[in-house]
Structure formats: structure tokens, C-alpha cells
Amino acid sequence: MSSSIADPLKPSIPSSTSPSTSPSPSIMDTQDATRVSDTPSEKQQNKISQISSNQNGHLFVYVHGLWGTPQHLDVLELIPKEFLNELKSDNLTNDNFYFLKPKSFTYLRTYDGIEYIGNKVMNEVLHFIKELLETEKIKITKISIVGYSLGGLVSRYIIGEFYKIGFFDKIEPFIFTTYATPHLGVNFNYNDSTDLTHSKFIKTALNNLINFAGSSLLGKSGKEFEIV
């Protein structure tokens, strides 16, 4: 799950449940409607702010990419942990640092689309913050979000949704960064001028075929890659 630099969390923070198989885009829009549409609300945020706390915390959220798992971002967590440990040991910060790698979408479930995945991640974040406050009396006052590949697009979505519910009125957005994220969309274009074995027609046909396959075989996420 996630880990703490100062004091590791004792409770296990459960992730939201997912279907046993990855739903197709058409099914996804209708099945488990209450869960899919259960976007975090301002009411949930207000409940969190009403709980008293003893210490402040800075939460780092790492969102993995297509076909990924939380473990894929383990290496991105190591260096910040060492650096933040040094800051705390040198008394340069009083914050406690916590790390969350959402695990409610993995492997084929990354096909479910940015909005669907984003709502899951938002609920994981709010649940983690609430559990930390209730069990450890640690109040998250800063949040940083790191997204890899598809995770970068999901991160953009949840940041926008957090603004809507007033999340950043109470928790300071600190760092947002993405790695290998197709912010301008994805388009395969094979146009190697040194390749004299294939005609322009064949290259164009190949491009169209691969772009069609990518947007068709990768579920709703694949379609959204084309239009981001």
C-alpha cells in the first residue's frame, strides 16, 4: 500500500472493489452505476475537515499507467523518500510524509477510461486522508501528485474534480508532475524516409490500421488517448 517516512501507518487502507473482469466501454457505463457515479463530493470533504488533528502531513500520490500496477512506481518513490527524510532529520520541515499508490485499477482495468478510473482514485485519496486523520490524528495539509503515462491523464482529471469540490481550499496543492504522458493525444505515424521498401500507400495504410487497433483494443482509455 502506501508507506510513511516518519511513522508507518498501522491500519491497512482497503482499495475500492473492482469487477472480476475488465468491463467493456459499453458495459462500464451502466454496470455498478452507483459506484461509477459516486464522485467525491464537497460533503465528503467537509466531513474530513471537521475532525481534529495533532500533526500535519504531506501526501504524495503516485498514479501508474496503462497495463500498470502500483509496484511499477516503487522506484519513483525511493529518491523522494530519502530526500524528505533528510529534510526532517535536519529539522527543515515539521511535516510527516505519506505515500499513496492507488491500486483500484490495474492491468486490463486500466482500459476503463480516464473518468471511471479518476473517480476511483479520488475516492482512494479521500478515504486515505480520512483514515489517517481518524486513526493517527494526522491532518493532510499538502498534496503532491505524480502521474506516469495514463496516470498523468488521470491525475489531470482528478485535479480538476478536486477543484470543483473545494478540496484545494483546505489542502494545498504542492507538486504536480507527469512522466511519459500523452497530453496531446496518441497518433502512430510511421514515416521513415530511409525506408524504401514500402510505398507511401502502404505506410499510410499501416498507420491507419495501427491507430484503429490502438483505439479499439485498449477499451475506453484507448479511445480517449486519441482525443486528449
Image (cartoon, rainbow, N blue to C red):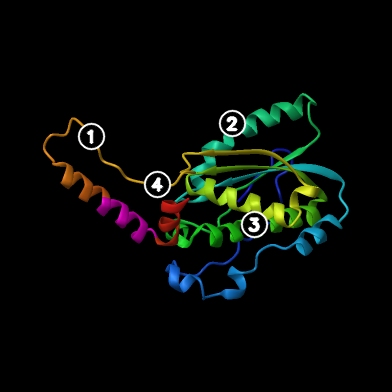
Q: Earlier in the sequence, mark 4 or mark 3?
A: 3
* Residue 100 x/y as whole percent: 63, 48
Is residue 104 something one can see in this rendering?
no
Q: Residue at x 53, y 41 (%)?
A: 74
Could you tell me which secondary element the residue under label 4 belongs to?
A: loop
Could you tell me which secondary element the residue under label 3 belongs to?
A: helix
Q: Earlier in the sequence, mark 2 or mark 1?
A: 2
Could you tell me which secondary element the residue under label 1 belongs to?
A: loop
Q: Residue at x 44, y 53 (%)?
A: 227
Is 38 placed left or right of 87 in the picture? left
- Residue 212 among those drawn in magenta: yes
Q: CA distance from mark 1 to mark 3?
A: 42 Å
* Amino acid type, label 3: Met
- Looking at the image, which residue sits at the far left? 197
* Amino acid type, label 4: Val
* Residue 161 x/y as whole percent: 66, 55
**Disc assigned to residue 122:** 3
Viewer-nearest residue: 2 or 145:
145
Residue at the spot of label 2: 79
Q: CA distance from mark 2 to mark 4?
A: 30 Å
143 w.r.t. 227: above or below: above
Q: CA distance from mark 1 to mark 4?
A: 18 Å
Residue 142 occupies which quadrant of the picture? top right
Could you tell me which secondary element the residue under label 2 belongs to?
A: helix
Q: Using a 10 Å C-alpha cutoff, classify the residue at mark 1 as few (fewer than 14 neighbours), some (14 to 19) or many (20 or more).
A: few
**Disc assigned to residue 186:** 4
Q: CA distance from mark 2 to mark 1?
A: 38 Å
* Residue 33 x/y as whole percent: 57, 75
- Which residues are drawn in magenta? 208-218
